[in-house]
Image (cartoon, rainbow, N blue to C red):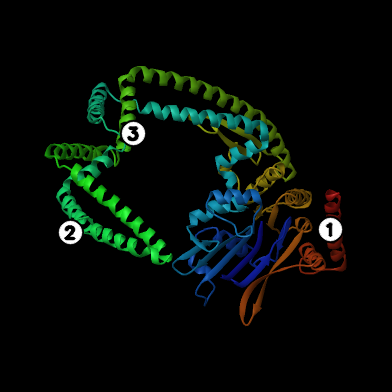
Amino acid sequence: MLVHLHVKNLALIQEIQADFGPGLNILTGETGAGKSILMGSVNLALGQKMSRGMIREGADYALVELVFQVNSHTEEKLKEMDVYPEDGQVIITRRLMENRSISKINGETSTAANVRRIAALLLDIHGQHEHQSLLYPEKQMEILDAFGDREISEARDKVAELYKKYSRLKKELEGYEMNEEQRRREIGFLEYEIQEISQAQLRPGEDEELEAAYRKLANGKKITEGLGYVYQLTGYEGEGMGALMGRAVQKLAQIREYDVQLENIYSSMEDMDSLLNDLNRDLSSYLSEFTFSEEEFGEIETRLDLINHLKSKYGHTIEEILSYEAEKEQDLEKLVNFQSRKEKLEKQLKNQENLLNDASAGLTEIRKKWAGELEKKIIQGLQDLNFLNVEFYISFKEKETFTPQGKDSISFMISTNPGEPVLPLQKVVSGGELSRIMLAIKTLLADKDQTETLIFDEIDTGISGRTAQKVAEKMKVIGENHQVLCITHLPQIASQADGHFLIEKNVENMETVTRIRKLSYEESVEELARMLGGAKITEAVLQNAAEMKHLAQQQKNTRLK
């Protein structure tokens, strides 16, 4: 829910902050106090275009900040959109300057489009056409499906699963769309590649073995010269290390009997002599066995050239080349058996299409059944809200193509006045009427809608008396499951407030400024009296206001019980 609003340097607003709570938050104030500016600031934060004159006179910038506390369901949805709430909070800010603006989500710069996409999870604003989701067919479908609850959900999930398989088969079949000449060319090319790899008879690890042998033979002269020199230094002839070591061992053997400590030195010297002797034999053996063969060297070089050529075309390693060969063999098999596989896929796709068509038709029937129920309830709800001669029904059309949600295209059709034709919702209603229509729908779906915060503006346009009381009661019902912010001029609605905020305009230091403050119970009664009595507030008006507030509180306590 929206827990905090901060606005600075916007029109008549110098700086205001408001903390909203759960339930029904009512905003009231005299005409011209700045109620529309306050709601407009929320729209600005969500990416609405800004006019040049909105920044307060003399200020360099304007700022709007919204702080939301989200539940676990919304938090998971936000994470899917790469937004990670901190301590369950999401902060949306927009800094407006004369020629540009900067939007941020939790401190990270974001586009206006992304802000709107994320804000759709957080709140729903009703009062201005560009923000009224009810006008969009996809939202209308969402409302119907939510009303049908589990029955529609299960049928829709079945359609989505069948559509997934249908799309996969369709995409696979599209790969078979080629003429005979293309097929022959592709077969010839695949056969050439497969034959080139197959003829090489590659063996995993072979390239590493050959490269090691190539290095050995290519550097044979250096190896033999180097080992010959080492053998001479460590040998047992002349002044070689082996001969010197032998004489040292012999000398120690002669003197070791004179001191027991010399035994350890003698033993170590013997071990060294033995190791050196072994080393010398290994060197001799390697030198005697090492031979350089021009023929062998040429064969290795030719083989490596072939392998490197194949690597340049089919993969960086022999394993990758062999994997490429296997993949192309599968492609070749598909092309060789092209017609039979195509016919098989066409049959599978047709069967899947029939299944999907039946499931979509079943979903349509279920939707139509629930649509009839929804129509009745919406008509009743609209009549309660002063649409006395309303006509309403849900129109169904079949889409030309399948979708994961079936083939239904629906439209809410309405006529709000006698003699007027029934037309799609977006072509008929005003902002105030649309707000009341959404109010009726939200009341029906109060326990199913996942949007946490609802904002209603102009909800009470053109209504009074008993209708106003009905609107107030419906607002209260929604407030039991959602956070509601509502601007109103009707005391019947304002009396139901869980939190009552007054927006007022004052002159301070020769400047006109708009302020907002939360009212106490007594202050709320006084504001209700002003709304009831106008300029002159009598004792009778105050008593009437107090009684209205008391009755609203009693109704609330009764519902809670």
Left or right, residue 244 beside residue 385? left
Residue under pointer 1? 548
196, 519: nearer the viewer: 196
Above or below: residue 291 compared with residue 431: above
In primary-sequence order, the first of circles 2 and 1 is 2
Query: Which quarter of the picture shows residue 328?
Result: top left
* x, y percent for residue 442: 68, 45
Residues at marks 1 and 3 touching, judged by CB atoms closer than 8 Å: no
Q: Identify the residue at horizontal 70%, vertical 54% (top origin).
A: 483
Confirm whether residue 420 shows in the render. no
Amino acid carrying mark 3 in the image: Ser
Residue under pointer 2? 238
Q: Which mark is residue 323?
A: 3
Pick out the residue farthest to the left: 294
The Cα–Cα distance between marks 2 and 1, rounded to whole angstroms, is 123 Å
Query: Which quarter of the picture shows residue 211?
Result: top left
